[in-house]
Each structure stands twice: as C-alpha cells, then as structure tokens.
Amino acid sequence: MWFSIRIVLLGLWVGAMAAFAFVFAPIAFAHIGPTPAFAATIAANVRAIVQGGNWIAVLCAAITVYARLEPRRTSALIVGCLALAVLCGAFETGIIVPQMEHTPLLTPAYDALHRESSGVYGLASLAALVAFWLCTRRRVS
C-alpha cells in the first residue's frame, strides 16, 4: 500500500512540474504574452507547485523512512533527491521569483533571472524525477 501511495504522490508532483514547464507556461505566454499579468500568473503557479511539492516530498520521505520499502542506501538517495528538490523550490520561490517580480520584463536582467529560474526549476524537476524512478524500482528476490 505505501509503495502505491508514494508512486501516485510522486507521479502527481513530477507530472505537475512537467505540465507547467511544457504545457501551461508556453500556452500562457502565447495567449497573454510578456505582460505583468503573465508574470504574476507564472509566479503564482510556481509557488503553488512548489508548495504542493513540499508536502508531497515530506510525505514521501516519511513513507520511505518508516515503511522501509528499499535498502538503506536507496532510501537515502530517495530522501536526498526529495530534499534537493525542496531546496531548489525554496530558492526558486524565496529568491528568484521575488526578484523576477520586481524586474522589468523583456530586459537583460529579467532574461538572466529567467535562465537561472529555468535551471533551478529543471534541477528540482530532475531530482523529483530521479526520486520517482528510484521508488519504482523493485528488487527481485
């Protein structure tokens, strides 16, 4: 049961991050364009995904530690990946997004922040994806 709950939670989180990056943000940009409304909408979505991801990461880490579904080394890797994703999300929403909200759009400064944001968000997504992958592996006995 714990195995399935963890997989569903991590699948939702990874799916939400991918849907935001590859579906929602490009569509919002195409329809709203580089406007303050677009920037505010994107910032609100990033914050919501990070906040939901934080809850999922905590629950999945707790399940990993207490249900003992994997060997210790694998469990440590999963918890480490979850922690990295949470730290990236905290950096994204605590430092980068607020700076972006106060930087004029379509400027070199904004573009630099966007590149940094994309890198940090990508790292968080990759860390969550690796945790998901590690959780789906089953030892053959």
Image (cartoon, helix red, strand yellow):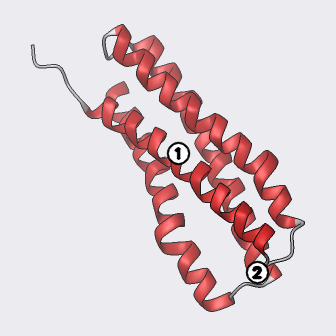
Residue ranking furthest to the left: 141
- The kind of residue on which mark 1 rests is Leu
Total numbered labels: 2
* Residue 36 falls left or right of residue 4: right
Q: Nearer the viewer, mark 2 or mark 1?
A: 2
* Residue 44 falls left or right of residue 55: right
Q: Quadrant of the N terminus?
A: top left
Q: Quadrant of the C terminus?
A: top left
| Up-down relation of residue 108 to residue 92 (above or below) | below
> Which of the numbered marks, if any, corresponds to residue 123?
1
The residue lying toward the viewer, choosing from 8 and 118, is 118
Residues at marks 2 and 1 touching, judged by CB atoms closer than 8 Å: no
Quarter of the image where one finds residue 24: bottom right
Rounded to the nearest angstrom, the CA distance separating label 2 from label 1 is 24 Å
Upstream in sequence: badge 2 or badge 1: 2
Q: Pointer 2: what residue? A: 106
Q: Residue 112's spot in the image, x, y percent? A: 71, 64
The residue lying toward the viewer, choosing from 116 and 57, is 116
